[in-house]
Image: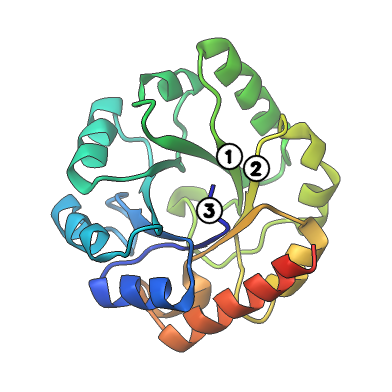
Amino acid sequence: MFRIKICGVTSTGDARAAADAGADAVGLNFFRKSRRFIEPESAKQIASSLPAGVTKVGVFVNHAPREIVEIVRQVNLDVVQLHGDEPPALLAELPKSVRIVRAHRCGADGLESLVQYLDDAGSSGRMPDAVLIDADAGADFGGTGRRADWSLVARQRSTFAGLPLILAGGLSPDNVAEAIAAVRPDGVDVASGVEAQPGVKDHELVSRFISQAREAFSHL
């Protein structure tokens, strides 16, 4: 699974800047209500501009399985990130050729609902390949810059069924090293923390974020 992901990319220029700075993955958002939404045809152009080895992640929110499958095929995605209220049984309907990241919006109930979700996913025939912990952003489904509860996530890491943990939610170049030291995740994911405006990346911030994250991971 990826270690450093720049999410909500909407242009080939931003995608290449992220890749050149050392990002392991680029996220393409297919949620129409998002300020970072991108049409599949544009996403295909961005994905095809990326060098080999950069993971192409599609972010989906309550899409029907057939829609996800079609976009995966059209864009040639490597990873599907489910960021909505998709039922556990949906995971088994997705192609085995793509990895799945199950995002969890950490709110008032903490991680209890995630534990139940993983149990149900296992019973339904397919577990995700990783879990992503984000702050609860309500109807925005992420990308708001709100910070997840790092101490809670660190305390309850053992509840993730041994799956890789990706940390998101309020990360920036100024706090990503602190977050990695506190939570010890397997990866980090950022969108708003490296933007000039929603959907437009600040290349200097992207570069600083990746540099800070790499340095912090090297100390784990």
Residue farthest toward the bottom in the current orientation of the protein: 204
Callout 3–callout 1 Cβ contact below 8 Å: no
Q: In the rendering, which numbered label is found on residue 2?
A: 3
**Residue type (three-letter) at the residue carrying disc 1:** Ala
Left or right of residue 62, residue 180 in this image: right
- Name above or below for residue 88 compared with residue 174: above
Identified at 24% across, 27% down, the residue is 66
Label 3: which secondary element? loop
Q: How many residues crowd mark 3 within 10 Å: few (<14), some (14–19), many (20+)? A: many
Relative to 152, say whether 23 is above or below: below
| Viewer-side residue, 119 vs 49 | 49
- Badge 2 marks a residue whose secondary structure is loop
Q: Amino acid at mark 2?
A: Pro
Instruction: Name which residue type carries label 3.
Output: Phe
- Disc 1: CA contacts within 10 A as few (<14), some (14-19) or many (>=20): many
> Of label 3 and label 2, which has the lower sequence position?
3
Image check: 158 left or right of 71? right
Is the Cβ of the residue at disc 2 closer than 8 Å to that at disc 1? Answer: yes
Q: Which mark is residue 67?
A: none
Residue 177 location in percent, x, y?
A: 72, 73
* Residue at 59 percent of width and 51 percent of height: 136
Q: Provide the residue designation for mark 2.
A: 164
Which residue matches tag 1? 130
